[in-house]
Image (cartoon, rainbow, N blue to C red):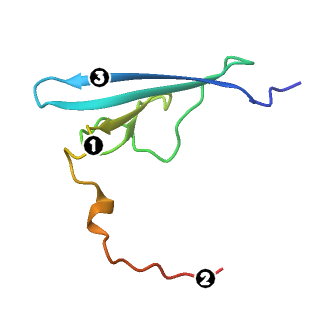
């Protein structure tokens, strides 16, 4: 019988990029029932200080992070925005 993947373990490490003063959260996830690692999908492979990336095997997401308020977020420029759409 195949595993239904109902329980997970997530590991997060924070890497400090000393020479530029930036930080990256390194995230890995696995099923605790069958021990299968999970791959991140929809993220470009490689490394980028300003955008999420994934390792070549897809098993580690590298997410740039910063202390709140130190780098403007895209949402800070959306004051007065409008959402249009239909169901």
Residue 16 left/right relative to 39? left
Residue denoted by label 1: 68
Residue denoted by label 2: 86
Residue 51 or 72: which is nearer the viewer? 72
- Element marked by disc 2: loop
- Element marked by disc 1: loop
Report the residue at 28% width, 54% height from top: 73
Quadrant location of the C terminus? bottom right
Q: Picture coordinates of residue 61 (x, y %)?
A: 43, 33
Q: CA distance from mark 1 to mark 2?
A: 34 Å
Instruction: Classify 10 Å Cα crowding around label 3: few (below 14), some (14-19), many (20 and above).
Output: some
Instruction: Classify 10 Å Cα crowding around label 2: few (below 14), some (14-19), many (20 and above).
Output: few
Q: CA distance from mark 1 to mark 3?
A: 17 Å
Residue 38 or 80: which is nearer the viewer? 80
- Element marked by disc 3: strand
Report the residue at 10% width, 25% height from top: 19
Q: Picture coordinates of residue 84 (x, y %)?
A: 49, 82
Quadrant location of the N terminus? top right
Q: Picture coordinates of residue 80 (x, y %)?
A: 33, 78
Q: Picture coordinates of residue 27 (x, y %)?
A: 45, 28
Residue 5 left/right relative to 13? right
Residue sticking out furthest to the right: 1
Q: Earlier in the sequence, mark 2 or mark 3?
A: 3
Instruction: Give the foreground label among 1 and 2.
Output: 1
Residue 14 or 31: which is nearer the viewer? 14
Residue denoted by label 3: 15
Give the answer, above or below, for where 61 lies relative to 11.
below
Could you say which quadrant of the image residue 33 lies in?
top right
């Amino acid at each position: 019988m195949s595993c239904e993947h109902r329980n997970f373990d997530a590991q997060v490490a924070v890497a400090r990029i000393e020479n530029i003063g930036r930080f990256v959260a390194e995230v890995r996830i696995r099923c605790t029932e069958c021990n299968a690692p999970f791959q991140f999908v929809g993220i470009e492979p490689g490394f980028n200080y300003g955008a999420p990336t994934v390792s070549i095997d897809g098993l580690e997401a590298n997410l740039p992070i910063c202390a709140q308020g130190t780098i403007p977020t895209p949402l800070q420029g959306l004051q007065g925005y409008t959402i249009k759409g239909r169901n």
